[in-house]
Image (cartoon, rainbow, N blue to C red):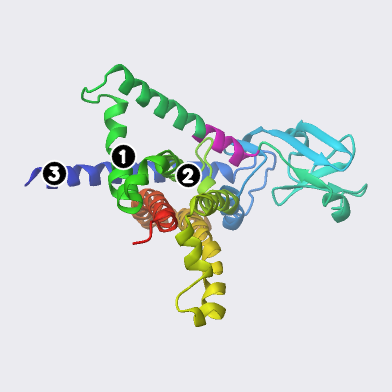
Amino acid sequence: MTNGSILNLKIFRLSFIYAFFLTMLAIPGLALAQKDTSKAAEQEFDPQAVIMEHIGDSHSWPVIGKTTLPLPVILYTDKGLEFFSSAHLQPEGATYRGNYYTYKIEENKIKAVDAAGKVDEAASARVWDFSISRNVISMIMTMTILLIVFLSVSSAYRKRPGKAPKGLQSFMEPLILFVRDDIALPNLGLKYVKYMPLLLTIFFFILINNLFGMIPFFPGGYNLTGNIAVTATLSVIILLVINLNANKHYWKHIFMPNPWWLFPIMIPVEIVSIFSKPIALMIRLFANITAGHIVILSLISLIFIFHSLAVSPVSIVFVVFMDLIELLVAFLQAYIFTLLSALFIGMATEEHH
């Protein structure tokens, strides 16, 4: 057996163990999530509620089962700012009287309500939510990890110039070189240095969140890259970078296609393509990550839907298989998003031949 085959076998075994561990971690968490100690009667299992709770945003940070930590609520209204803890809005349906309006959480959104506790749509339209939600905390956590890792790696390069990498530096260098040699250089040419910080940030931001999002019901588990607002923000950043750095040949190709008699057809098509590229990035990342989470959680839910341990071996086997695929998807989606971003930027900055 060759060294490459041995390495691939080791990687497969490690991936299988990791996927199996995630599955074993998710099942007791799922059971605890359905346990309500305030009621003596057993509640009927609702897989849709459990799945939507995981893939959606929240105003509380999950710890284990029903235990959560409240997060700060920051509301901007037409009458002024409101600050309070989300603990005042727990459990869901509870109301809290602020300085200007009365609020409650409905479908993970804070709404203004009237005296009877019903949602006041007119008042809710005047309330803008800038709260520190679970996704915001997750994003801050990811940014902190990225800063610690990259500052540590850059410090190692400064302290040991020209020497072989070691520790965290040796782990990160192949990934950084992969982004440079396989993504940036082929698509951006000699201009790659200018865009490397952006491409590295996007690649590792998506990768870290994809991997952390694979741990359902783990303390702090979240689904950041499966949130359409997050993927839309990343896509808007790419849209701005493309069009703010585009050269005259890019704009000439859009507004002065050749031959001239194609103007009525090609100009609208090219204008649409300006926005269709980042939209494709947004939908691809959001759909793939969210779909994977839903499939895995649905397979785990089968155990509780059928109320039988006989189903668990089959369910666990399929979940482990899906976890292995999701490990691949976690890296693949980070790679594809970064690759297409570099490709679109390269197309906009390429000199005319």
Residue type at the position of mark 1 = Leu
Q: Picture coordinates of residue 144 (x, y %)?
A: 50, 29
Residue bearing the label numbered 1: 175
| Residue drawn at x 13%, y 44% as measured from the top left | 6
Residue 305 shown in magenta: no
Residue bearing the label numbered 3: 6
State the separation of the CA atoms marked 3 and 1: 21 Å
Assess disc 3: are there few (<14), some (14-19) or many (≥20) residues with their C-alpha within 10 Å of its C-alpha: few
Residue bearing the label numbered 2: 213
Answer above or below: position of 275 versus 164. Answer: below
Q: Secondary structure at mark 3?
A: helix
Q: Picture coordinates of residue 248 (x, y %)?
A: 48, 58
The segment highlighted magenta reads 133-142
The disc, 3 or 1, on the residue closer to the chain's N-terminal end is 3
Q: Main secondary structure of the magenta part?
A: helix
Q: Quadrant of residue 140?
A: top right
Q: Which mark is residue 327?
A: none
Label 3–label 2 contact, CB within 8 A: no
| Residue drawn at x 31%, y 43% as measured from the top left | 180
